[in-house]
Amino acid sequence: MCGIVGLFLKDKSLEPQLGNLLSDMLITMTDRGPDSAGIAIYGGFAEGKAKITIQSSNPGADFDGLAADLEEAGIKAHVWIKSTHAVIELDTSKLGAVREALERIRPAVRLMGSGESVEIYKEIGLPKDVVARFGVRAMSGTHGIGHTRMATESAVTTLGAHPFSTGADQCLVHNGSLSNHNNLRRELVREGMTFETQNDSEVAAAYLTAEMAKGKDLGQALTGALDDLDGFFTFVVGTKSGFGVVRDPIACKPAVMAETEQYVAFGSEYRALVNLPGIENARVWEPEPATVYFWDHDKAA
């Protein structure tokens, strides 16, 4: 059992409140997942710039002098430290180079996510502590997703926490269990995908990344997942400009959505949505089985 939440803002005036609203939604789901928590915030896009979020179990050693060491490696970057995580901002053209440099000069750090817009923070612990640790409430943005985990089949680790990110500005949170993830993992490895964990949710994220690399948008990739993924699942997925939801054909995992002129919201339970502005006037519904819901800032919302 896990708790997942998501919020896609249509109204730009709400963007400064995104982190605060998502934090409340996530904390409300604590009893569905007290082991670890994570959140992805999309925002702060700057033309020609990219961000990479990294995590360290020894941030004092790994983050100290990181900007200077990157510059010595030929990469000019700004580094913002947030507890066990750091966000590196640099020219988009240097994104591949910084990955190679980190493997060489900071081999112990772990990549949480990268792209032009997304920042991902996840750690072991209660959602309220994870939110406070990374200052999520003060963050602004256009949309975001979050997850509270109750581990049932694997160890409680930072890498095992959600969201999982396997492509630029792409990430996924999942409630459920996939039955064909081992076979699918082998197929994706043959296609060039790499994996950090044995978690089935990372396979789902990688599947979507691979499908979108073929030219599909998020909605089309989620539609394909209904045929190619076996098991029980509810996915909430983010891209640079998009937000998608899909449930498997049986749809035994709880889910509720709400939409107003200001936002689209998702929660594992309705109580995750009750403090959203104008929720009393929202259209509220349970997402249908085997049905893709997809919004995109670059298209009609």
Image (spheres, helix red, strand yellow):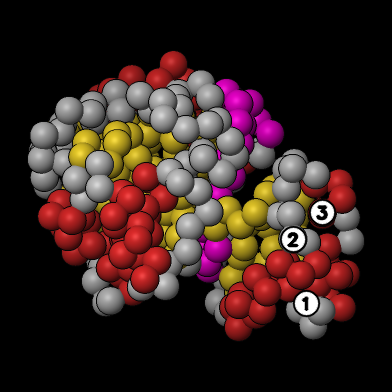
On whether residue 234 falls in the magenta region, the answer is: no
Residue 263 visible within the image: no
Determine whether the residue tagged by mark 2 lies in a helix, strand or loop: loop
Determine whether the residue tagged by mark 1 lies in a helix, strand or loop: loop
Name the amino acid, label 3.
Asp
Question: Residue 109 in the image: x percent, y percent?
Answer: 71, 55
Determine whether the residue tagged by mark 3 lies in a helix, strand or loop: helix
Position of 11 relative to 289 (above/below): below
N-terminal-most mark, 3 or 1: 3
Name the amino acid, label 2.
Pro
Q: Which mark is residue 107?
A: 2
Which residues lie in the magenta part?
Answer: 114-133
Find out whether the residues at labels 2 and 1 contact each other: C-beta distance under 8 Å.
Answer: no
Find out whether the residues at labels 2 and 3 contact each other: C-beta distance under 8 Å.
Answer: no
Q: Is residue 273 left or right of residue 301?
A: right
Name the one closer to the observer, 76 or 178: 178
Q: Which mark is residue 62?
A: 3
Q: Which residue is mark 1?
A: 76
Q: Which mark is residue 23?
A: none
